[in-house]
Image (cartoon, rainbow, N blue to C red):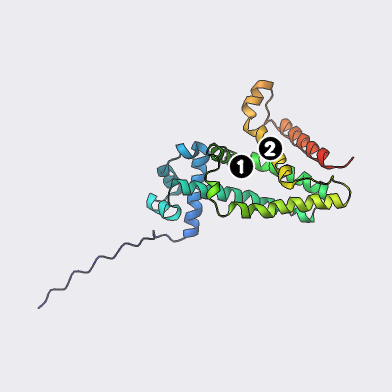
Amino acid sequence: MHAKAAPRPRAKSAVPQTRDPSATRAAILRAATDEFSQHGLGGARVDRIAEKADINKRMLYYYFGNKEDLFLAVLEQSYRDIRDAEQALNLSETDPVEGIRSLVAFTWNYYLEHPEFLRLLNSENLHRAEHLKRSHEIRAMHSPFVAMIDDLLERGRRSGVFRAGVDPVQLYISIASLSYFYLSNRYTLSTIFGRELLAPREQAERLGHMTDLVLGYLIRN
């Protein structure tokens, strides 16, 4: 009588076993966004990201390769989130002047509500955008947004309200800068001028000031 052969051990799958890959990726990105925004790329730790996402490091590396690639994925997702939210403003159906008001207010409020976005931009600028330069998505996701602003400006020009020759990219950079500089430097500026720049009244005054500046430039005299 022959003894039964011992069963062969099953080969380990290269793919980590998980019930919901999409949910796992999303959990990793949320945890990584928090970690990178708090500590920057250099100070971020994969161990902490895995712990926050409630996964093991092997799974993190399977989905995103390495820390540098994960950082790029976080940047891409962060830009995707803000561009999707901007598209939801539906500015193509909005009066040009009101559309500009909406865009300025949206940018201001988004930066207020998502300080992690500003910190991620600060971190990537320290690295001279070396990660974004590797992205195959970043330019494509921004093209519709630029086209939306351009359409808003052109409709305002045709109606005789806006001046001609306004570059939509330059305009958006100016709108973003008005919010970004104020918020990224709020601690030093508050100390220098003896004003709490994030007090509700100061926030409302800032939004009104930015809106007046942008519309003052665009509207024809």
Task: Answer with mark 2 or mark 1, whichever residue precedes in sequence.
Answer: 1
> Which amino acid, mark 1?
His
In the picture, the quarter occupied by the N terminus is bottom left
Q: Which mark is residue 137?
A: none
- Residue 180 lies left or right of residue 22; in this view the side is right
> Which residue occupies 64% across, 22% down?
191
Other-residue count near label 1 (Cα within 10 Å), few / some / many at <14 / 14–19 / ≥20: few
Q: Which residue is mark 2?
A: 177
> Which residue occupies 60% across, 39% down?
118
75 or 195, nearer to the observer: 75
Numbered disc 1: secondary structure: loop
In the picture, the quarter occupied by the C terminus is top right
> Which amino acid, mark 2?
Ser
Query: Distance between the Cα atoms at labels 2 and 1?
Result: 15 Å
Please state the total of marks drawn on the protein image.
2
Q: Please identify the quarter of the rendering in which residue 105 is found.
A: top right
> Which residue occupies 45% across, 52% down?
64
- Residue 91 lies left or right of residue 189; in this view the side is right
Q: Position of residue 66 (x, y in %)?
A: 43, 49
Q: Position of residue 29 (x, y in %)?
A: 50, 49
Numbered disc 2: secondary structure: helix
Other-residue count near label 2 (Cα within 10 Å), few / some / many at <14 / 14–19 / ≥20: some
- Residue 214 lies left or right of residue 120; in this view the side is right
Residue at the outermost left position: 1
Q: Which residue is mark 1?
A: 114
Q: Please identify the quarter of the rendering in which residue 121 is found.
A: top right
Position above or below: 12 against 60: below
Q: Position of residue 175 (x, y in %)?
A: 72, 40
Position above or below: 91 against 114: below
Q: Position of residue 106 (x, y in %)?
A: 71, 45
- Residue 40 lies left or right of residue 51; in this view the side is right
